[in-house]
């Protein structure tokens, strides 16, 4: 509907949201990655031209970056974008999406081996602390599972954050 209204009346910020949502829907419901990626790139281009760039980037970070881009683009370019979207989200006060972008950066760095384990441990600590500060418990708990594995792999210990055990996290998940 938003795409139809845009074609009829012209572009506005909600048009960009409509295009991004359409691309995300194509990805979810048809698995046509190529078309979804194309629509997402059009949305991103429109966002960059908008005077409301930071708010739109923050609002659409999950649709445009966290879900589709890791499948269709090299991870190093996605990681850089996660950090940019983190900044945009913090600028607009959208701490929920900011924490999600930072979590995505940390998780992607963990799985791709893009950062050494000690640097990555520091990034995880900062993200877990930030998630706790802004009461984003879901992100915090999800990060703790990877962080515990990261500590074991790096052979380091953690004194910076209170990390729950796997059993405690299982209990939280069952609630």
Image: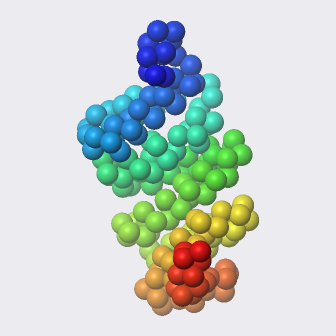
From the image, which quarter does the C terminus lie in? bottom right
Residue drawn at x 55%, y 46% as measured from the top left: 85
Side of 137 relative to 69 (left or right): right
Q: Is residue 150 above or below residue 72?
A: below
Residue drawn at x 40%, y 40% as measured from the top left: 24
Residues 9 and 151: in front is 9
- Would residue 128 be visible to someone looking at this image? yes
- Would residue 37 be visible to someone looking at this image? no
Residue drawn at x 56%, y 19% as measured from the top left: 12
Side of 98 relative to 132 (left or right): left
Residue drawn at x 46%, y 88% as measured from the top left: 152
Q: How is the image coloured?
A: rainbow
Q: Position of residue 167 (x, y in %)?
A: 54, 88
Residues 22 and 160: in front is 22
Name, please, the residue furthest toward the top. Answer: 8
Total numbered badges shown on the rendered structure: 0
Q: Is residue 119 above or below residue 66?
A: below
Query: Residue 101 falls in which quadrant of the image?
Result: bottom right
Q: Position of residue 8 (x, y in %)?
A: 46, 9
Q: Position of residue 154 (x, y in %)?
A: 46, 85
């Amino acid at each position: 509907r938003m795409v139809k209204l845009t074609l009829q009346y012209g572009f506005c910020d909600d048009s960009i949201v409509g295009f991004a949502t359409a691309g995300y829907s194509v990805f979810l419901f048809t698995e046509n990655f190529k078309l979804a990626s194309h629509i997402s790139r059009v949305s991103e281009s429109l966002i960059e031209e908008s005077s409301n760039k930071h708010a739109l980037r923050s609002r659409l970070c999950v649709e445009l970056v966290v879900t589709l881009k890791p499948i269709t683009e090299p991870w190093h370019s996605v990681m850089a974008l996660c950090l940019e979207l983190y900044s945009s989200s913090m600028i607009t006060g959208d701490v929920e999406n900011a924490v999600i972008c930072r979590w995505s950066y940390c998780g992607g760095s963990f799985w791709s081996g893009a950062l050494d384990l000690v640097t990555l441990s520091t990034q995880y600590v900062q993200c877990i602390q930030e998630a706790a500060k802004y009461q984003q418990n879901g992100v915090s708990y999800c990060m703790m599972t990877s962080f515990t594995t990261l500590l074991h792999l790096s052979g380091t210990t953690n004194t910076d954050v209170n990390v729950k055990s796997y059993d405690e996290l299982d209990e939280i998940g069952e609630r």
